[in-house]
């Protein structure tokens, strides 16, 4: 918890980053509601909460990335999630997420920030990024 507070304090002192949502194209690629989202030529996968939960079960080393604020995180989050607010990703991803090939499952409150962040991570060279929307749609356990 102390590390989260320290990292968040550092994050708040940084300028926020923005993504041009006009550059995002979405195409459905299967009936399971998995979609491919492109940011320029890079692509992040969008999956359902049930698909995300299955990936978590299959890969216990998966990184569950919460891109909300510290206050939102403190109100409740998915067990095992790490906090990296969306406005700090560009600056701190290389420190918090050093393995660009790691399985990263991204969520926020409603899905907007997670989609933008997933696309940003892919454009930064991360190769295994999935957006599963917002915690509002997460029907499973939280803490």
Image: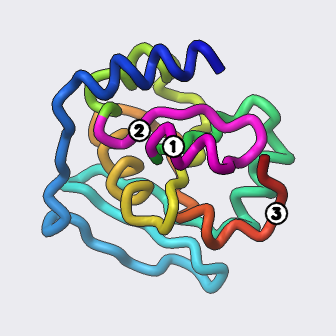
- Secondary structure of the residue carrying tag 3 is loop
Q: CA distance from mark 2 to mark 3?
A: 22 Å
Residue 75: in magenta span: yes
Q: Which residue is mark 3?
A: 140
Query: How far is mark 3 from mark 1, CA to CA?
Result: 21 Å
Mark 1 nearby-residue class (10 Å; few <14, some 14–19, many ≥20): few
Q: Quadrant of the N terminus?
A: top right
| Element type where label 1 sits in the image | helix
Q: Which mark is residue 47?
A: none
Q: Circles 1 and 2: CB distance less than 8 Å?
A: no
Q: Residue at x 16, y 63 (%)?
A: 23
Residue 90 at x, y = what percent?
27, 30
Residue 85: which numbered mark, if any?
A: 2
Front residue of 38/131: it is 131
Residue at 70 percent across and 57 percent down: it is 52
Q: Secondary structure at mark 2?
A: loop
Range of magenta residues: 69-87
Q: Residue at x 19, y 52 (%)?
A: 19
Tag 1 residue: 71
Q: Closer to the N terminus: mark 1 or mark 2?
A: 1
Residue drawn at (52%, 21%), measured in percent from left and top? Answer: 5
User: Disc 2 or 3, which lies upstream in sequence?
Assistant: 2
Residue 116: x and y in percent read 33, 55
Is residue 52 positioned above or below 81 on the image? below
């Amino acid at each position: 918890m102390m590390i989260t507070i320290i990292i968040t304090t550092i994050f708040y002192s940084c300028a926020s980053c923005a993504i041009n949502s006009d550059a995002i194209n979405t195409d459905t690629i299967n009936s399971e509601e998995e979609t491919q989202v492109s940011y320029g030529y890079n692509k992040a996968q969008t999956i359902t909460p049930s698909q995300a939960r299955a990936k978590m079960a299959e890969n216990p080393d998966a990184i569950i990335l919460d891109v909300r604020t510290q206050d939102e995180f403190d109100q409740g989050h998915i067990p095992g999630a790490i906090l990296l607010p969306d406005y700090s990703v560009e600056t701190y991803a290389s420190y918090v997420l050093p393995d660009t090939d790691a399985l990263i499952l991204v969520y926020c409150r409603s899905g907007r920030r997670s989609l933008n962040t997933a696309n940003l991570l892919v454009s930064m060279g991360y190769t295994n990024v999935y957006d599963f929307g917002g915690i509002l749609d997460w029907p499973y356990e939280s803490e």
